[in-house]
Amino acid sequence: MASAATASVLAPPSVLDQTHNLPQEDQDALKAAVFQRLHPRVYLERFVREEIRPDGRAFGESREAAVNVGSISTADGSALVRLGGTTVVCGVKAEIAEPALDAAGVGFLVPNVDLPAMCSPRFRPGPPSEEAQVLSERLNQALVASGFVDLDALCIHPGKAAWVLYVDATCINYDGNAFDAALLAMVAALRNTTLPQATYNEETHRTTCARAAPRVPLRLSPSTPVAASFGIFDGKYVLADPTAFEEPLLEGSVCAVLGAGGAVVSLSQTGSVLVASADGAERDVLAECVAAAQRRRVDLVRAAFGEE
Amino acid sequence: MAQYVFDRRRNNGPEDSFPPVFDSDLRSVASKSEPKPRKDRSPLDIRPIFLQPGLITQATGSTYIETERTKIACAIYGPRQSKNTSFHEKGRLNVEVKFAPYSCQRRRSPMHDAEDRSIAMAIHQALVSSVRLETFPKATIDIFITIIETDGIEGCVAAGSIAASTALTHAGIEIVGLVISCSAAIINSEVWLDPTDEESSSSNGTLVLSCMPALQKVTSVWQKGRMERKFQCMKACQNRSDDIHAVVGQALLEAAR
């Protein structure tokens, strides 16, 4: 009796010991998770040395994309896009406004992205973070530069009434590469958007829509803009479609937005994209990334929209 | 009309914009119409619930809930360190509700307004007595709720509370019991459970009852308007909550497998 009591005093059950009760498999998973948390860089290095990424993808492999359109009935057009774990919902709301004085026959396109505190522990509640602001601006530029939406067709009566398309994307789960997912969601939502037929009455100065008349889809350019992002890790590896774990470890990144036939709509490069080959010679991978983005675009457009 | 606030942190549209006006709506006189009788469910039936825990992989716990048109995503972060607050012996529960701009018939400005605060208050009230806050002093549990589509504010509060309680369980946070909410409206002096937006706007009064069916305890009652049969309403809500409790339990069990 006494010896048992002393033994328990000498060896108090500590919190750490509790993990020994777990099966071996769970213990290893826990060790790996702790290692990933404490030494993310070394963790990723060990993976890429084996020519594989932590989620089992090859370097040039993108995550699978799933697009689901038209599920939100309060929006005039909507889409839900899942790019691996990253989930973005986009809704289009159409309203009517007076066109700008210097562009009497042109409607408006107002894209915005929200990265709410819900989607990642990195984000705080409140006004849009710097990251969300940059993302919104880049998406705006990509949509405007590609001329995807025919803004002239949004005019109801020159100088008096035009449609405003509020394109709002909300990130539900942030697992990296939100730009590609948000652009895909916005494009899919715009393709899904229909507008009621509106007429401007010059006598009453009112714009009314016909409920009975069929709704009309937007006039869109056949060249759908699609983005593909790449990250440079350790000056040696080009990782396509980086995850939230990989993103902070990258020293450079390339994002290419391409239209039909590989026409470059927007190209952005941050940091160095010089990559050392096995023999030590450095090469610029920008052109390789654009070529890979073109292949990715063909796959995505076929999978998501079933064309081209 | 969307109230215009220039926000340099967002892409701004024109100063004024209006939702489209339909010709047929102008002719018919806006009146408090009689609600149409329900087609596919009886007054005491609720809309079918789809519940999926664990969709938001970045969060400690999460749930997506869908009851016909109402769609809500909920994520739990924490317990994590309370920032900018003095010492608390008990943990804190922080509920934030956000409407997506496209979630309602009219576009909502992306800023916070009074409505999402009041929904957050109602959900906080429904949940706070179920969570064992004494087990994590100095810490906060953040409950973030994004409303993707709404069909009635009462339904939002009810679905939001169910989603948040399920997500808390999914996050492995100690609670004394699952909180289940159910809404009801008095229409033609009859009790209609789980009213849609159209139904609740044509009723005299609505009520949302939150309870823990496992303990037979009510955590909150939120009533709006004039209600002559409120106890009958509460009883009906409580009975229906037992059914929802089974649905939530099943969803959690499947997610754990």
Image (cartoon, grey):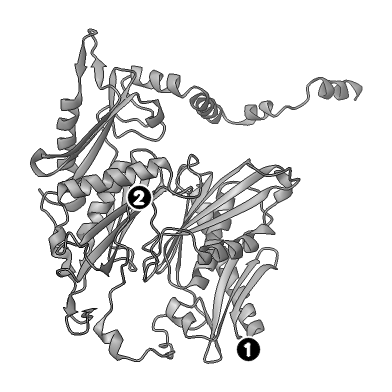
Vertical order, B19 against A25 (above or below): below
Q: Which mark is residue B103?
A: none
State the residue position of label 2.
A113
Q: Position of residue B41 (x, y in %)?
A: 44, 80
Is any part of residue A255 visible from this angle? Answer: yes
B120 left or right, relative to B4: right
Residue type (three-letter) at the residue carrying disc 2: Val
Helix, strand or loop for disc 1: loop
Q: Nearer the viewer, residue A196 or B56?
A: A196
The N terminus of chain A sits in image quarter = top right
Q: Nearer the viewer, residue B32 or B8?
A: B8
State the residue position of label 1.
B228
Chain letter behind tag 1: B
Q: Position of residue B96 (x, y in %)?
A: 54, 55
Vertical order, B253 against A235 (above or below): below
Q: Residue furthest right?
A: A2
Q: Residue at x 69, y 47 (%)?
A: B91
Q: Residue at x 25, y 17 (%)?
A: A275
Chain letter behind tag 2: A
Vertical order, B246 against A232 (above or below): below
Q: Residue at x 54, y 67 (%)?
A: B157
Is any part of residue A84 visible from this angle? Answer: no
Callout 1: few (<14), some (14-19), or many (20+) C-alpha neighbours within 10 Å? few
Total numbered badges shown on the rendered structure:
2
Q: Position of residue B18 (x, y in %)?
A: 31, 71
